[in-house]
Image (cartoon, rainbow, N blue to C red):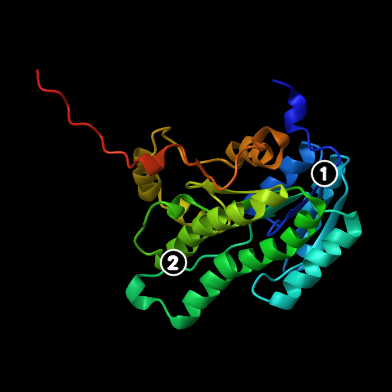
Amino acid sequence: MSAALFDLTGKVALVTGASRGLGKTFALALARAGADVAITSRTLTSLDETRRAIEALGRRCHGVVLDVRAQASIALAVAEAHAHFGRIDILVNNAGCNIRKPALEVTWEDWNTILDTNLRGPFFVAQAVARRMVAAGRGRMINVGSVTSVAGYAGLGPYTASRGGIRQLTMSLAAEWGPHGVTVNCLAPGWFKTAQTAVLYEDPEWVAYLTDKIPLRRPGRPDDLVGTVVFLASDASAYITGQLLLVDGGISVNVTRALPTKK
């Protein structure tokens, strides 16, 4: 197999929510594979660290202000990224949020915040980028989902609804834009320690409980996602579209420990 299949030299990627966490990991992974990268956040200064890290790799980087809950912001951000680089070959639709509450305590505003950020926003980002990709006759879209795209968890009702929705949206967009040379796939991480989930990992009992449910016996590390995002962005995945790719250590197989065998 040729390493050129994974080479992103000459490509331009747009990564939303790239100031920290997995978004930053995705942006750096694509840059290491050769791509120039447009990165977004709601505040430009929060992108400084990611931008410097990408430029240290010898790649071009441009920071863009984007609030995925505002349609005008989406249109302006995608237009700016495209104008700066002259093209967008790869989209990593990563920006997201969560509010953890029991279902009986979720407010109307909580629901709107989560679904607007995790589902409506990514759709309109994809739409804005697809207009450029369809015109170019080629593109790679990666929607970031979660293991909750396929499993329900107590206390995460609106979040799981949004992540299940992004999986279904991925399939619909893949069917619609495939004839134009655009692939659309969903990268679904399992349990990773990020700024959004850090508070959970402060509880050693919870970490032990979680680890017991993961066949590979540990939570995910950001580097576990690097190969997958490059694969989905590259020519190596040219005939893959509409798919959900779980990177979860196997937790989605719903592990139940076998009872000891009686002798």
Is residue 24 something one can see in this rendering? no
* Residue type, mark 1 in image: Lys
Marks counted in the figure total 2
**Residue 65 percent across, percent down from the top left:** 78, 68
Type of amino acid under label 2:
Arg
Is disc 1 placed on a helix, strand or loop? loop
Location of residue 260 with respect to 82 vertically, above or below: above
Q: Are marks 2 and 1 in contact (CB under 8 Å)?
A: no
Q: Is residue 261 left or right of residue 139?
A: left
Mark 2 to mark 1 CA distance (whole Å): 37 Å
Which image quadrant for residue 232?
Answer: top right
> Disc 1 designates what residue?
11
Name the residue: 63% across, 37% down.
Answer: 239
- Quarter residue 263 falls in: top left
Q: Residue furthest front?
A: 179
Picture coordinates of residue 257 (x, y %)?
25, 34
Tell whether 101 sits left or right of 73. left
Q: Is residue 212 above or below residue 152?
A: above
Q: Position of residue 89 (x, y in %)?
A: 78, 49
Is disc 2 placed on a helix, strand or loop? loop
Q: What is the x, y in percent for residue 75?
A: 76, 71
Q: Is residue 228 left or right of residue 3?
A: left
State the residue at coordinates (34%, 45%): 209
x 50%, y 52%: residue: 146
Which residue, as the protein is rendered here, is positioned at the far left? 263
Tell me, for residue 131, which label it has, or none.
none
- N-terminal of the pair, mark 2 or mark 1, is 1
Residue 235's image quarter?
Answer: top right
Residue hosting label 2: 100
Q: Nearer the viewer, residue 175 or 212?
A: 175
Residue lying furthest top? 263
Q: Is residue 232 above or below residue 172?
A: above
